[in-house]
Amino acid sequence: MATVQNISIDQYLQKVATFVNSEYGRLVRNQFKDTKGTSELAMLATPTLEELEQLKKAVAIMTPKEKESANTLRDEQIERIAADAGIDPANFTIFINGYALHCKHVSWSECVGTEEN
């Protein structure tokens, strides 16, 4: 049986940062532009440097308990963290929801702060 490797919210942030300001990232962002020229749907695949810096601020101020249970944070908690960090709450919500979906996709037991059934 393979050893389960936990992924923390900090590790997920590093994973999201993979294509920041890269040629590939720009290509993906361009494919997802809406009528306003924004591409929020591509934010988790290829965040801009500004979006990444905002996410880093929010993750940096999270308490250890919030980090351990990041995949189950309530909307109010997400909004408070974003407000305390002074960042766009929509982007932080997308990030946290992406982490929760990642945890669910890879199996809840592979994410920090979850228990195996």
Image: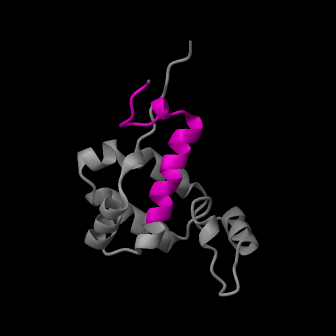
The quadrant of the rendering that contains the C terminus is top left
Q: Is residue 103 left or right of residue 76?
A: right
Question: Picture quarter containing residue 39?
Answer: bottom right
From this view, report whether residue 18 is shown above or below residue 31. Answer: above
Q: Quadrant of the N terminus?
A: top right
Vertical arrangement, residue 26 with respect to residue 104, above or below: below
Which stretch is magenta? 93-116
Q: From the viewer's perspective, tell me whether residue 76 is left or right of residue 3.
A: left
Determine the residue positioned at 45% across, 45% down. Answer: 11
Q: Quadrant of residue 42?
A: bottom right
Tell me where residue 96 appears, x and y as whole percent. 45, 56
Picture mark count: 0
Verify whether residue 80 appears in magenta: no
Spot the residue most to the top. Answer: 1
Position of residue 25 measured from the top left corner of the image (x, y, whole percent): 66, 65
Q: Residue at x 71, y 66 (%)?
A: 28
